Amino acid sequence: MIGSDQLREVLAAVGQLLEAKGKTVRIVIVGGASLNLAGLVDRATDDVDVIARAEEDEGGPILIPPDPMPDALMAAVQRVARDFGLPSGWLNTAVANQWETSLPPSLEENLTWHRFGGLRVGVAGRRPLIALKLLAAVDQGGPQSVHYQDLVRLNPTEEELEEARGWATSEDPSPIVADHIDQVIRHVRDDIE
């Protein structure tokens, strides 16, 4: 587990290693790590979920799929894993399968960038996090899951829940999934009132 204080420390260590090699890498994160960096929660997380990389364009950063991750980044991540006693997959792209369907609403427009030496970390904003946490709560245990608890902590508005519902149902339009989404939303409404 990576605590909120250690999260900044390990990202800074990766950034220092990249900077020492003259490299700059931009990643976009979601999940518990992004909630911690945004100051929305203060809890440990299992990993850092990388949903995208960003490349500089004249109009600003543009998002691209994260895989394959740059060799310099992966070497730094592995060294930090060893130095800090973290599992080898502490920074991973498992969530990047979202590129196969669609990214959450307004992800690119709702990023806050943090600089850790040669590592630039884009932290997803509320709307994309609400959408992803809703989908994760449906997939992984409903109200008992950490994703559900994070969703409640985000205290989404009705508008944000409806936007998240629209996106989540587009990810899997089956009636069973839509019913599960509605159940989770009902629980969220009850828990935030």
Image (spheres, helix red, strand yellow):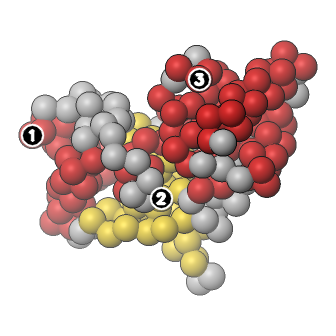
- Of badges 3 and 2, nearer the viewer stands 3
The residue pinned by badge 1 equals 83
Give coordinates of residue 184: x percent, y percent: 70, 27
Q: Looking at this view, is 100 or 173 the one in front?
A: 173
Find numbered disc 1 in the image and state the secondary structure of the residue it sits on.
Answer: helix
Give coordinates of residue 191: x percent, y percent: 62, 34
Regarding residue 20, the answer to whether it shows in the image is yes
Q: Looking at this view, is 40 or 19 the one in front?
A: 40
The residue pinned by badge 2 equals 123
Q: Does the residue at mark 1 contact the one at mark 3 (Cβ under 8 Å)? A: no
In the visual, does 116 lie left or right of 160?
Answer: left
Query: Which residue is drawn at the image coordinates 52% and 73% (left, top)?
Result: 56
Query: Which residue is drawn at the image coordinates 34% and 31% (left, top)?
Result: 46
Q: Looking at this view, is 10 or 22 the one in front?
A: 10
- Of badges 1 and 2, nearer the viewer stands 2
Q: Which of the marked residues, 1 or 3, is nearer the chain's N terminus?
A: 1
Q: How far apart are marks 3 and 2 (CA)?
A: 25 Å
Residue 58, above or below 25 = below
Amino acid of disc 3: Pro
Q: Which of the marked residues, 3 or 2, is nearer the chain's N terminus?
A: 2
Residues packed near mark 1 inside 10 Å, few (<14), some (14 to 19) or many (20 plus): few
In the visual, does 43 lie left or right of 174?
Answer: left
Q: How far apart are marks 1 and 3 (CA)?
A: 36 Å
> In the rendered image, which quarter contains the C terminus?
top right
Give coordinates of residue 88: x percent, y percent: 26, 30
Find numbered disc 2 in the image and state the secondary structure of the residue it sits on.
Answer: strand
Rendering quarter of residue 97: top right
Residues packed near mark 3 inside 10 Å, few (<14), some (14 to 19) or many (20 plus): some
The residue pinned by badge 3 equals 143
Q: Which of the marked residues, 1 or 2, is nearer the chain's N terminus?
A: 1
